[in-house]
Amino acid sequence: MQFEAASSPSLTSRPSFDPSPAPSGVCLFPTLAPAELPFIEPLPESLSCSFTLPAASHSPGIVRAATRAILRVHGLAEVADVVVQVASELTACACRFSPSAQVYVSLRYREGAMRVTLYDDHPRHANTRLEAACQSSRGVTLRVLDQVVRACDGEWGIGGGLEQDMGTRMWAVLPCEGARAYGCAPGPGDCQ
């Protein structure tokens, strides 16, 4: 594969590159998009982001930072405190119970509400008593989340994955109106 040097005036200010062929299976140069293309600000309606993290004690911190940045970019900074709290609580719980090395995080905005979903590989228990005990343990771990979601007029739950052997899914739906009101609760430094 051969590369030709660009002669377009808009590309001359970019760093030059070696036109020799790349080793098999290696991409040495990113795609060069024209610099004159405008940046289109993401809208809340376009928020659909998923990522996988280690099931480790540092992952809730990563989720907090990533969630806050994602919400800010999508124009949802006013609900960030509540959504970050919920995402962090779900992540900590998933990391605590996951028998595997990773957890899956999903952030979505739909119909005026933020949806936070966490998947871990903890299997469903065939024995109903064990399943109830497991659900209860997760519920106790998520007491703070329960209070925050209720205060926002949202809902949350714990259930099986979308497929039989997919593990455990935990989710919360936070109406943005309730999340805004929760963030502006009267008190010292209120939002008025």
Image (spheres, helix red, strand yellow):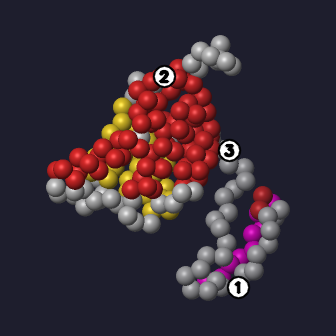
Q: Residue at x 80, y 68 (%)?
A: 15
Q: Which residues are magenta?
A: 1-9
On screen, residue 128 versus residue 79, left or right, reads left
The disc labelled 2 sits on which kind of residue? Answer: Glu
Q: Quarter holding the C terminus?
A: top right
According to the picture, the residue beneath numbered tag 3 turns out to be: 38
Q: Residue at x 54, y 57 (%)?
A: 57
Going from N to C along the chain, the mark reached first, 1 or 3, is: 1
Q: Is residue 3 magenta?
A: yes
Q: Can residue 66 be spotted in the picture?
A: no
Query: Which image quarter: residue 102?
Result: bottom left
Residue 145 x/y as whole percent: 44, 36
- Contact between labelled residues 1 and 2, with CB atoms less than 8 Å apart: no
The disc labelled 3 sits on which kind of residue? Answer: Pro
The disc labelled 1 sits on which kind of residue? Answer: Ser
The disc placed on residue 20 is: 1
Dot 1, how many residues are within 10 Å of its Cα: few (below 14), some (14-19), or many (20+)?
few
Q: CA distance from mark 3 to mark 2?
A: 31 Å
Q: Main secondary structure of the magenta part?
A: loop
Q: Secondary structure at mark 1?
A: loop
